[in-house]
Image (cartoon, rainbow, N blue to C red):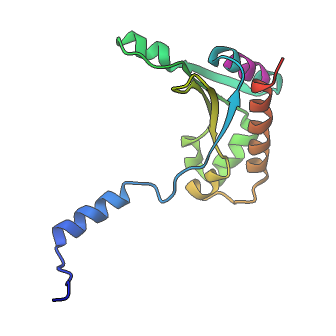
Amino acid sequence: MSPRFIFRPFVFATALSALMTFPAYAADMITKISPHSVTITMDHLAAAVEGAGATVFARVDHAAGAAKVDMELRPTELLIFGNPKLGTPAMLDGQTAGLDLPLRVLVFADAEGVVQVTYHDPADLAETHGLPADAQYLAMMTGALDKLTSKAIAEE
């Protein structure tokens, strides 16, 4: 007896709906290891951002937030920063890029205590928001993130 496919509209519709709720791709993340603590790495990153003439919009201490609701989270901080000279042209090409801008870098201690510096590859903005893949601002964002995070993890 050969197996046969039985079309069940409800099952098909449910499966299709579930697939459509997930993005068509998984964003590429770039991770570097820091020899410093989360706080020191983040301090270095913020100083590098400001030194490069960009603006730090926020520094979020997720572990402190967790502590406020009596939960424990390993050291985890997020830096939100940008430069309108790069972000504005991206949003002019695809205004939904504002969902992923300004840029964000997460610094956290993993389960082994290794401090990681992680961010999304700016090239993903092209696919996500319909931006030109060869846009100069994407190359500049990529270079800036690499340079800034490298300064944050540099040995002193």
| Nearer the observer, 90 or 18 | 18
Q: Reply above or below: 47 against 81.
A: above
Residue depicted at x 79% and y 42%: 143
Q: Is residue 69 left or right of residue 132?
A: left
Asked if residue 67 lies in the magenta stretch, the reply is no
- Position of residue 2 measured from the top left corner of the image (x, y, whole percent): 20, 88
Q: Reply above or below: 74 against 146.
A: above
Residue depicted at x 61% and y 39%: 101
- Position of residue 89 measured from the top left corner of the image (x, y, whole percent): 71, 47
Residue depicted at x 36% and y 54%: 21
- Quarter of image, res 12: bottom left
| Nearer the observer, 118 or 13 | 118
Quadrant housing the N terminus: bottom left
- Position of residue 37 measured from the top left corner of the image (x, y, whole percent): 66, 16
Which region is colored magenta? 42-48
Q: Is residue 105 visible?
A: yes
Report the number of numbered marks.
0
Classified by dominant secondary structure, the portion drawn in magenta counts as: helix
Q: Is residue 10 left or right of residue 34?
A: left
Q: Reply above or below: 117 against 12.
A: above
Residue depicted at x 70% and y 60%: 133
- Position of residue 104 measured from the top left corner of the image (x, y, whole percent): 62, 33
| Nearer the observer, 150 or 78 | 150
